[in-house]
Every structure is written in C-alpha cells, then in structure tokens.
Image (cartoon, grey):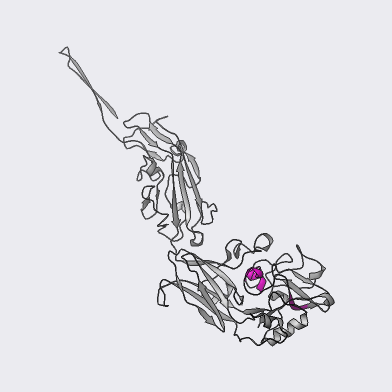
C-alpha cells in the first residue's frame, strides 16, 4: 500500500511532498475463508483435519507415525487442502477465479479486473496400500491402509497489481502423507496358496483377492463358518493379513478335536497359521494296502485365533480370527498311483475315512474351459465355477479353498485324485492343481488317493 502525502503552503515559495511506503500483507491462497493463509510452498502443500490438526512438509513424519483421521467413516473429502474436491489437478489461476475464489488479501488489494494473477499448478494423488488409485470421496478402510496422499506443485506466484508486498512465491515441491482411518485392528485376509487364483480361477471380489487371498467374511463368532478355511489337512498353512496394527502380536496355539492351529512368524501386519492333525506321513504306510489306523478326530470344530499385545495369554486382545473346520483330508502321498477299489480300502483302514465326492474337492462344472465328455454327469460344489476347473470360493471344495496342493509340503500329488462319484461304473477324478474333473476307462485307470472325514 502506497500513501502520497502532499502539503502546500500558498503564502510561501516552498512546496513539500513526501512519499511513504506502508508495509501491508502479501496476497494469499485460502480454502477456508482466510482461516488458513497460504503464502509459501510449505503451506501450499499442507493439509488440515476436521479436529483442527494441520500438517505441512516441515511437520510431516507420517512415514513413521501414520496420520489417523479423527472420526470413523471419513473420506478424503474431509481432509482440507487447496485442491478442490472435484479434481486432482488444478492451475493456480483457476483457484483464484470463480467458482472457487480461493484467495484473499487483508489489505484489500487485488480487486477489480486483473487485480490478481497466478501462475503454476497444484496436483493430488491418492493410492491405497496396494498402490491402487483412490477417489476423493472414498471412505477410508483399515484393510486398504495406509493410504498415500501426495501433493505436488510447480513453481508459481500469486500477485496483485498494487500493494506492498504484492506477491507470494511458490517453489516446485512435493510431499507424501500416510493416512489411516480411525478404526480398530482387524484381520483383512486369509491367504492360502494363491497359485491358480487369477482370471477364470478368481472368485468374486468380495470373497477373493488374487494377491491377498480370501477376504475376512465375519468377525462374529456365530458366523465364523463364513470364513476360510472350512476344510483342512496336516501341514497346510495360510497367512493372516492384519490391518491397522502397529506391533508384533503374541498368538497361543489352539487345539480342538485332535487338530491344532499353530501361529508362527508374527509381525505387525501378518502371522502364519499351520494346521496339524492326523496324517499318514511315512512312505511305508502310504504304500501298503494294510496301513495302521490314525488318530481319531471330532468335527466340526470352531477355531478362534487370538492376537495379544503380550505373551502368556495375559495380554490385551488386539485382534481375533475365527473359522469352522468341517472336514479333514488325508493324502495317500504323491507316489502311490492306485485303482479306485484299493484306494477305497486304504481310506477305510486308516479309520473312519472315505473317498470324497466331486463336490467335496471342487466346484468345477462340465462347461467352458476344460470341458469334455470326460466330465459329463459330474456334480461340483456350489457356488459353482463357470468352467471345468475351480473358482476360488469358501466352502466349495477342498482343492477350491486351498489352491494348488503340490505347493504345500503336505504329501499331495499334483494330478488326478479319485472320487466316489461315478457314471456308467466309471469313477470321476479331480486334478488337485486346478480342480478339473475327468474320467477314464477302468482297465487303464489309476489315480492318486485322498480320504475325507466325516
């Protein structure tokens, strides 16, 4: 602001003129009516939360201490910033004009046509923990956190025609904020072998993620049966993916009905669960037609796995995961290729086991990819696949749930396994690696053996 003072004395030959520069304030950008005044790059890339907390590049340490939103159910639109909620990139000259008018000058400078100008641009990027783009109106969820919110700008200025100072300058820069919703830790995924889990093999998005495995379906004990797994076998394992947790947890083994779930390799974001129970592990017992009986089990059984903040079972409960085992499978091993009758006899002799039906192994249907006359008449589990191979689902067959069995160290072969279902006196077989159903004439047909209880 410039003030010219002119003092004239008419009865003297002297005229005095003085010019004083009155220091005012620089123009600023603002998204909240002047409460937040942005005059430098630091503030340009700042964010504010609904509880009044503000973060700038200088104060940001969210890569170590994640920013937690103050209210559950908030979206990125609840985070204050200069980028309007309807765009991810904007020129500063657009910010200062209608409909935004995101600027101010406490001295009143910048009014009128071309009274204020701006150069440069501001950009926003938001991705979830899997680097998938996220929209501004997305409500944050703990299983997709932490989110990365990146603000960047090009070099620019905000300038009024008059006033001193009449310009704010912004250097090119960027900042990334790591943000979590307000939520308690939860189990997000239960991940068995994900091989054969993409494209036609992938289940619905609310059930199966090709990279993460099965989504947790319930945290309510009465509906733990909706969660993976519903089937099991000795030495099969899966990983629990934990969201919203900031420390490694302590897990005690859980045993029910002759089966144990043991947790190992805990971190703040995961833990491995290994099932152990009756099995035929020695080659001599797998190869003989007169195997010893194995330990009896009792099914179904509810398993609740509890992660605590300290050991000894005395710590605070941080997270739980429950599932219901309904069936237990025993393999005859990867080296014994036998007739159906000898496989049936072997299953009977190890205890109260039997040869499984097609639907207890796979949800394949005799259509689409892999279909032929060899699978006609077979009945797979529901919900069904649309092809002659499994589609990853919970409770839709042993191979369907666990994926390619040969990838585990659980004594399973990678090829055809007998089932008790038959057509025209020919028993169907199911391939363990992908759940495909087939059948072959009896004189030339042998297959691997798997038994199920009950």
Q: Residue furthest left?
A: 11
Whether 300 is drawn above or below 387: the answer is: below
**Magenta segment: does it hold 312?**
no
The residue range painted magenta reads: 392-421
- Give left or right: position of 52 versus 325: left
- Who is closer to the viewer here, 14 or 292? 292
**Where in the figure is residue 214, as x and y percent of width and height?**
58, 66
| Residue at the far top in the pictured view | 13
Q: Residue furthest front?
A: 284
Residue nearest the observer in this picture, 254 or 139: 254
Q: Residue at x 37, y 41 (%)?
A: 38
Q: Tell me the quarter of the image containing the C terminus.
A: bottom right
In-image side of 123 versus 447 (left or right): left
- Determine the image quadrant of residue 436: bottom right
Tally of marks: 0
**Is residue 50 rendered to the left or right of residue 379?**
left
From the top left corner, tell me how far across and down residue 17 is, in percent: 22, 19
The image quarter in which residue 157 lies: top left
Residue 248 seen in the current view? yes
Residue 435: x and y, percent? 71, 69
| In the depicted structure, whether residue 328 falls above or below residue 244 | below
Q: What residue is at 32 percent from the left and 32 percent from the top? A: 165
Residue 288 image point, x, y percent: 71, 84
The answer to whether one can see residue 228 in this image is no
Q: Quadrant of the N terminus?
A: top left
């Amino acid at each position: 602001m410039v003030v010219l003072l002119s003092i004239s004395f008419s009865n003297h030959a002297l005229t005095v003129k003085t010019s004083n520069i009155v220091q005012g304030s620089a123009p600023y950008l603002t998204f909240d009516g002047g409460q937040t005044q942005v005059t430098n790059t630091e503030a340009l890339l700042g964010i504010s939360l609904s509880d009044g907390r503000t973060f700038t590049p200088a104060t940001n340490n969210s890569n170590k201490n994640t920013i937690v939103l103050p209210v559950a159910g908030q979206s990125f639109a609840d985070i204050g910033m200069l980028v309007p909620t309807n765009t991810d990139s904007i020129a500063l000259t657009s910010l200062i004009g209608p409909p935004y008018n995101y600027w101010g000058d406490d001295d009143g400078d910048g009014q009128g046509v071309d009274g204020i100008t701006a150069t440069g641009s501001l950009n926003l990027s938001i991705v979830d923990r899997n680097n998938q783009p996220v929209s501004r109106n997305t409500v944050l969820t703990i299983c997709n956190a932490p989110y990365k919110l990146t603000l960047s700008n090009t070099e620019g200025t905000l300038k009024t025609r008059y006033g001193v100072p009449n310009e704010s300058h912004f250097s090119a820069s960027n900042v990334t904020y790591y943000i979590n919703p307000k939520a308690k830790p939860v189990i997000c995924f239960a991940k068995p072998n994900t091989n054969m889990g993409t494209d036609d093999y992938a289940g619905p998005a609310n059930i199966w993620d090709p990279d993460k495995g099965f989504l947790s379906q319930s945290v309510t004990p009465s509906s733990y049966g909706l969660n993976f797994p519903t089937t099991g076998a000795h030495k099969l394992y899966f990983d629990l993916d934990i969201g919203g947790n900031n420390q490694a947890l302590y897990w005690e083994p859980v045993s029910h009905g002759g089966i144990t779930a043991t947790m190992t390799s805990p971190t703040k974001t995961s833990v491995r669960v290994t099932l152990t129970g009756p099995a035929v592990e020695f080659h001599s017992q797998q190869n003989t037609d007169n195997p010893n009986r194995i330990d009896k089990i009792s099914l179904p059984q509810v398993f609740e796995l509890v992660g605590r903040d300290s050991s000894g079972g005395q710590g605070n409960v941080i997270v739980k995961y429950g599932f219901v085992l309904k069936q237990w499978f025993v393999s005859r091993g990867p080296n014994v290729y036998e007739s159906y009758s000898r496989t049936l006899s072997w299953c009977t002799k190890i205890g109260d086991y039997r040869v499984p039906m097609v639907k207890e192994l796979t949800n394949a249907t005799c259509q689409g990819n892999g279909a032929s006359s060899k699978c006609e008449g077979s009945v797979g589990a529901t919900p069904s696949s649309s092809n002659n191979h499994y589609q990853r689902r919970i409770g839709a067959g042993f191979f369907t749930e666990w994926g390619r069995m040969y990838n585990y160290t659980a004594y399973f072969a990678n090829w055809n396994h007998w089932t008790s279902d038959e057509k025209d006196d020919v028993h169907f077989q199911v391939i363990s690696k992908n759940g495909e159903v087939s059948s072959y004439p009896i004189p030339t047909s042998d297959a691997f053996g798997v038994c199920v209880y009950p």
